[in-house]
Image (cartoon, rainbow, N blue to C red):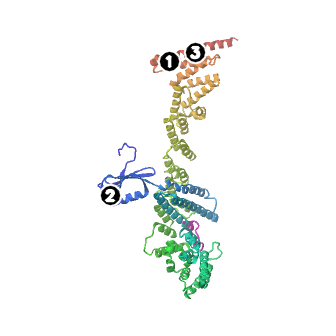
Amino acid sequence: MDESDTEPPLVVVPGADPSARQLCFAWGPAEVLVCETLFGRAGGSRSRAAAAARALTRSVAGTGEGAPSSSRVFVVRRDQDIYIQTLRKLFNESHGIFMGLQRSEEELAGKSRKAQLVQVSKNYRSVIRACMEDMHQAAVSTRDPALQGQYSTQVSILSAMELIWNLCEILFVEAAAAGPLLLRLLDWVRLHVCDVDSMVREVLSSESPSKHKLFWNVVDVFVLQGRMDEARHLLSKEASANPTSMNMYKILDDLMKKMPVPSLGNTQTLTELELKWQHWHEECQRYLQDGTFASNPHMESICKILLGDEDAILEKKELMTTWYHFLVTRLLYSHPTVKPLELRFYAQSSMDLFLGGESSPEPLDMILMAAFEFEMHQVIKECSIVLSNWWFVAHLTDLLDHCKILQSHNLYFGSNMREFLLLEYASGLFSHHSLWQLGVDYFDHCPEYGRVYLELHIERIPLSTEQKALKVLRICEQRQMHEQVRSICKIMAMKALRNNRLGSALSWSIRAKDAAFATLISDRFLKDYCERGCFSDLDLIDNLGPSMLLSDRLTFLGKYREFHRLYGEKRFPEAARLLLTLMTAHIAPCSFWMTLLTDALPLLEQKEVIFSAEQTYELMRCLEDLTAGNPDKQKFQDDDVETTKVEMLRLALARNLARVIIKEGTVEGS
């Protein structure tokens, strides 16, 4: 591109082969333009870069790939998710939760503060779930396969976000202790990992539930998730249908009923729980060794699961589907009093046992593993890389920062992690035509760099309408951002002037306190008056108030309009004094003097004498100064209209002077 061009230049990727097709890019405020250029065979690195671009971008132009003349152009946005309509609820509602958290920071302390933070975390999760349900509904209702695929992908992402957030809530926000920790993890598994409701409905709605092919699968899932009451209810149907198994059923039902579980009310100590659990475990072991369930493989398998037999639990791998479900089931039946710091050891071994070298951990697995290892910074880092927007890490980090558990982690340029992530998230919001308003509040709560970022971003907002400009202006005024206020007002004043909307232009220039621009617009008002014989935007000019002191020309405009108002109200003496003041104070432009003197003619011709002798002499002097001091004197004299005006003024002034002298002499004589 030419150096004279105002567009940013395209930059070729450094180190690229000049004989091959290359990727070029141009940076913008919130996005980057990526395109392919040159001919030739693309190398492997270019192919990978193009694939990444296609995954993250919206193609705006292009032809078939691979053709010699093909060209593909991409717009890579920093935060593409903010343009997804169905995610607007996530951004808008979480903003309210965020602001409430900032305001309540010092209100509560101790247990009350902890309960409040847990509730805030749940509020965030409820917003994620509501958006997930909306997205799922959109996926079901659309007929466009491409849109359906996009919605399904978003549902998966939101589901993963809620899964991670809920685990962080248990481990970091609530910081559940040994005992209650296992109960929270069981709730986590039941909510997120294995939804068996449809399978249960299918089994229970059948004529003979115990004969259904999925009957034992449902029982096993209930046992694996610690849902003993539901498992016992289903087993009772098996006992009713098979009286021969009644004895085994009663024993298994009794074991499941007596299984010790932690309590949330701190009604028993961990030592008491461990003793009860040990006795119960020995009882289960005795029945299994006695061969009580040998004649029924399903019940025998359940008894092995109750004993925490890892091989028996792993046989139900397909029902658990994930290693973290296996982890929680393993803890439930082997280590119910697990302490938070012991989770890392069980988590790692559970993942190794479950995957068994058959597959590699996915990014989600690594994030959850980092959480179980209490590596909070690693969780945030991995989520920043994997997730498609900054919403999750920004809000989670802010919440953890309020919990006082996120150690200050200063980055190399000085900002801490919380502020850095909030700045990135808010910057993405500012690239959206309406969500930028949310970004303002996020910048406000970044004490170190928030104001600087806000000043830079707010200058880039397109001021497409006056309503939007007023909204931006109000934000700047509330924060004493004087430079941005002046800049916005000047831009809007120039736009109004280009559209010949003088009233709006004058209003904006006054708000900007720009004396030079106010003078320019005042001259335009006066020029229009000379051409049309009347003022536009009278309401504005009549109510200038102290603002007219911004410039001499604006003062003259306001006072000249006041003269016309006094004249219209037939307050002739006051109008005459004001007119004379405007001329003698030298705030009127020289080009307007003839207009002012012409305005004096009707007052000079009134039946009642308006101007005194001294005032008449002043008018005469002004007229002579005008005719004698005009640089285009010869042209002025050759203009018949101007010459006629001058003669009429001289005659009117002479007659008025004569009338004044006679009137004043009569008064003195009497």
Against 568, residue 347 (above or below) is below
Which residue does the numbered mark 2 point to in the structure image?
Answer: 42
Residue at the location (52% across, 28% down)? 528
Q: Considering the image in quadrants, where does the C terminus appear? A: top right
- In the shown orientation, is residue 527 left or right of residue 236? left
The spot of residue 612 in percent (x, y) is 62, 18
Residue at the location (32% across, 59% down)? 43
Of tags 3 and 1, the one toward the viewer is 1
Quadrant in the picture for residue 404: bottom right
The crowding category of the residue bearing disc 1, from other C-alpha atoms within 10 Å (few below 14, some 14 to 19, many at least 20), is: few
> Of the residues shown, which amino acid type is indicated by label 3?
Ala
The spot of residue 517 in percent (x, y) is 51, 35
State yes or no: discs 3 and 1 in contact (Cβ < 8 Å): no
Q: Earlier in the sequence, mark 2 or mark 1?
A: 2
The Cα atoms of the two marked residues, 2 and 1, are separated by 79 Å
Which residue does the numbered mark 1 point to in the structure image?
Answer: 641
Circle 3: element type: helix
The Cα atoms of the two marked residues, 2 and 3, are separated by 91 Å
State yes or no: discs 2 and 3 in contact (Cβ < 8 Å): no
Residue range of the region highlighted in magenta in the rendering: 168-181
Against 533, residue 253 (above or below) is below
